[in-house]
Image: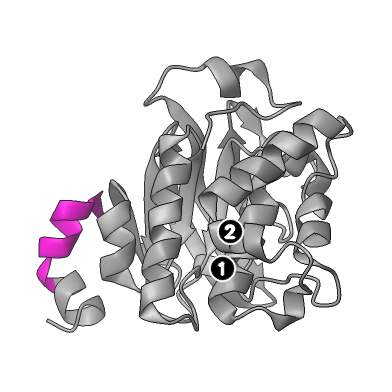
Amino acid sequence: MRTRHPHRAPPDVRFSEPGSPLLAVENLEVRYGGIRALKGISLHVCRGEVVALIGSNGAGKTTTLRTLVRLVQPAAGTLRYAGEELTTIGTEQVIERGVSLVPEGRAIFPNLTVRENLELGAFLHRDKTTIAESLHDVEQLFPRLGERMAQEGGTLSGGEQQMLAIGRAMMGRPSLLLLDEPSLGIAPKLARQIFEAIRAIAAAGVTVLVVEQNTRLALEVASRGYVLRTGEIAREGSSKELLADPMVREAYLGA
């Protein structure tokens, strides 16, 4: 997969130094009525990193991702992407700046073909050559999709639909890829293939924040991680540190 920089991304996204903060979340609070779903969490993702956000159901992981792309309004805190405050712009503007979200449940269009689903991911791009190159990159990343371009998305297996959802996000040439439970409901062999693809995406220069309940799989690919518990950051550290942490091992690794 060729390293590319997304069109319409701010110059500081494309040319900032490796290891510099691309995403910075400070004291983020989200409320659903009187319920505090996020209780002032802070995290950061540096350019070129894969960072895992792990935790049990209801911990606030999906809420965090939805807030980052402005589908949820924060009650307090700041969201900065490439130095720009995201709370002042809408979802479409966040996407235009190079952020792509692959939601939980995949949300593909079942009655459209694989090719049509992928082409929808390139809606920000009008150049046919750019779209063709992006399609080629997705086929290299997921050869199964290349074999099924004319097949309707709804006829794919769960793992193939997840590949399609990730491929569609990559058609937008993001700088930051947000993944919500990419292994959910997928056979272990295909789940591992998907995480190998995530590793390849990162190697091509895309920064990744992945929400995942399969803690071991996520931390095998990520360089760092955060443990979210009932809306608060309970642990953070390198993947090696988290894999060795007694609380993480007991709560999320069954050890």
Chosen colour scheme = one colour
> Residue at the spot x=63%, y=54% of the render?
167
Q: Which residue is mark 2?
A: 65
Residue 77 seen in render:
no
- Residue 192: x and y in percent read 36, 67
Whether pointer 1 and pointer 2 mark residues with C-beta atoms closer than 8 Å, the reply is yes
Please tell me whether residue 141 is drawn above or below residue 18 in the rendered image. Answer: below
Q: Viewed as shown, does residue 232 lie left or right of 91?
A: left
> In 3D space, how far apart are the residues under numbered discs 1 and 2 (Cα atoms)?
5 Å
- Residue 180: x and y in percent read 54, 65
In magenta segment, residue 238: yes
> Residue at the spot x=49%, y=78% of the render?
184
Q: Amino acid at mark 2?
A: Leu
The boundaries of the magenta stretch are: 234-246
- Identify the image quadrant of the C terminus: bottom left
In magenta segment, residue 222: no
Q: Residues within 10 Å of mark 2 (few under 14, many from 20)?
A: many
SS for callout 2: helix
Q: Which residue is mark 1?
A: 62
Q: Amino acid at mark 1?
A: Thr
- Residue 83: x and y in percent read 58, 26
